[in-house]
Amino acid sequence: MKRKGTETEPPEAGEGVTFEQMMKRLEELVLRLERGDLSLEESIHSFEEGIRLVKQCTSVLGEAEKRIQRLTEEGAALTGGGQEPEDAEERGDDELPF
């Protein structure tokens, strides 16, 4: 049963739903909650959906971080097996070794 005055909900995150789409939906939910014109039940439902989206986005970001770490390690291995270059002191800690 659809509640009067509510927006249609997008499909659950999974295949075909991008990180950007999840973030956009999360932003929409936050705006709806901040408006303060939802019923208690609608607010709870929006909050629950938002929590699910936060967990899914966190998972996607965690996987992206792992991929970046793996690629960085592979790049370091290709450029000398992790040995520090002679100009390491000139390079900041936040800069990549290649």
Image (tube, rainbow, N blue to C red):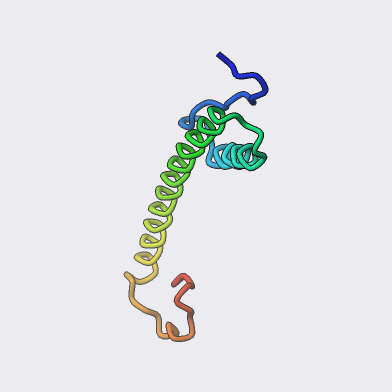
For the point 60% across and 19% down, the residue is 3
66 or 97, nearer to the observer: 66
27 or 66, nearer to the observer: 27
Q: Position of residue 30 (x, y in %)?
A: 60, 42
Q: Position of residue 25 (x, y in %)?
A: 59, 36
For the point 43% across and 42% down, the residue is 55
Query: As displayed, is residue 58 above or below residue 17?
Result: below
For the point 40% across and 85% down, the residue is 86
Give the left or right position of residue 89, taking residue 19 as reference: left
Extreme-top residue of the structure: 1
Give the left or right position of residue 52, taking residue 32 as reference: left
Query: As displayed, is residue 9 above or below residue 71?
Result: above
**Which image quarter holds the N terminus?**
top right
Query: As displayed, is residue 98 above or below residue 2?
Result: below
For the point 40% across and 48% down, the residue is 63
45 or 19, nearer to the observer: 45
Tag count in the figure? 0
Q: Position of residue 11 (x, y in %)?
A: 53, 26
